[in-house]
Structures are given as structure tokens and as C-alpha cells.
Image (cartoon, grey):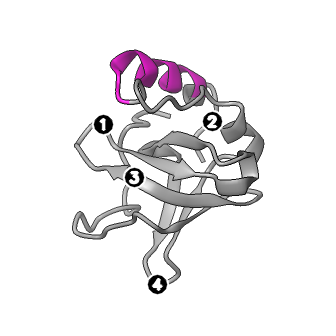
């Protein structure tokens, strides 16, 4: 991914759209809902609460993993599978905003081709 911390062209053009609460779909099915969305330029990501899918855990997904946001359906569509998300570096409420965690996520998601 050339710039995984930014949304692709046409994915998120309306900065006034609040996507917190939107359902999140991996390429192979639903994984939860958006718990938090960071919209700072060059540092965009979503935090997904996976609910019972992975025992109530949360996962940080760089904006570059998002391929589409549908405001009418209230859904965010990802370019990653459930397993790829499950295998990503673990979320920690105290460190997920740190640059070292972001670098670790970047290395992990950077190994996958963009879709």
C-alpha cells in the first residue's frame, strides 16, 4: 500500500460524515463495528470493535485498508480478510496511538497487496 494511513480516492470524501457505529465488512464477512475513527491527514485509521467475533477485542485498521464507505447502508468495507485482521498486531488501549505501534501495523499491513 503506497499510503496506508490515507483513504483511497473517492473512499471518504465527506469529512463531516461520522462513521462511528457503522458496521465493518471484511472481504469474507462482517467483523464488527467502528468504535473510533481518526481523520487527521496522514494518520487516518479506524478502530473496530469485533464484539463476539474475537471475544470482544478491538483492532486498529489503517485507512488504506478501507475500500468503500456506504453511508446509506452504514457500512465500511475493507480489503482484508477476517484472518488477516485477526493476525494483526494486537490492540492495546494504552499504546495504540503510539508511533511504534503504528509502525508495527504499517509493517504488517504493508506486506499485503493493495486492492
Q: Which residues are magenta?
A: 97-108
Q: Secondary structure at mark 1?
A: loop
Place of residue 36 in the rendered image (x, y in percent of width and height, measured from the top left):
39, 52
Q: Which labelled disc corresponds to residue 55? A: none
- CB contact under 8 Å: marks 4 and 2: no
Mark 3, secondary structure of its residue: strand
Residue at the far bottom: name it: 72
Residue 36's tag is 3
Give the mark toward the camera: 4 or 2.
4
| C-alpha span from label 3 to label 4 | 19 Å
Question: Which residue matches tag 2?
Answer: 113
SS state under label 4: loop
Cα distance between the residues tagged 1 and 4 = 26 Å
Magenta-span inclusion, residue 13? no
Q: What label sits on residue 43 in the rendered view?
A: 1
Residue 102 highlighted magenta (yes or no) = yes
Of marks 3 and 4, the one in the foreground: 3
Does residue 92 sit above or below 53 in this rendering?
Answer: above
Tell me the chief SS of the magenta region: helix
Is label 3 or label 1 in front? 3
Residue 14 location (% of width, % of height):
26, 68
User: Nearer the observer, disc 2 or disc 1?
Assistant: 1
> Would you name the residue on which mark 4 appears?
72
Camera-near label (2 vs 3) is: 3
Q: Nearer the viewer, residue 29 or 91?
A: 91
Taking depth in this image into account, of 85 and 1 the one nearest to the observer is: 85
Amino acid at each position: 500500500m503506497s499510503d496506508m494511513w490515507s483513504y483511497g480516492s473517492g473512499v471518504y470524501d465527506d469529512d463531516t460524515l461520522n462513521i462511528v457505529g457503522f458496521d465493518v465488512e471484511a472481504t469474507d464477512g462482517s467483523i464488527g463495528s467502528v468504535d473510533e475513527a481518526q481523520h487527521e491527514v496522514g494518520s487516518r485509521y479506524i478502530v473496530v470493535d469485533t464484539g463476539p467475533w474475537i471475544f470482544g477485542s478491538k483492532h486498529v485498521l489503517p485507512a488504506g485498508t478501507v475500500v468503500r464507505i456506504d453511508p446509506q447502508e452504514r457500512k465500511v468495507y475493507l480489503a482484508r480478510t477476517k484472518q488477516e485482521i485477526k493476525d494483526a498486531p494486537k490492540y492495546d488501549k494504552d499504546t495504540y496511538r503510539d508511533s511504534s505501534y503504528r509502525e508495527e501495523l504499517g509493517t504488517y499491513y504493508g506486506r499485503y497487496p493493495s486492492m
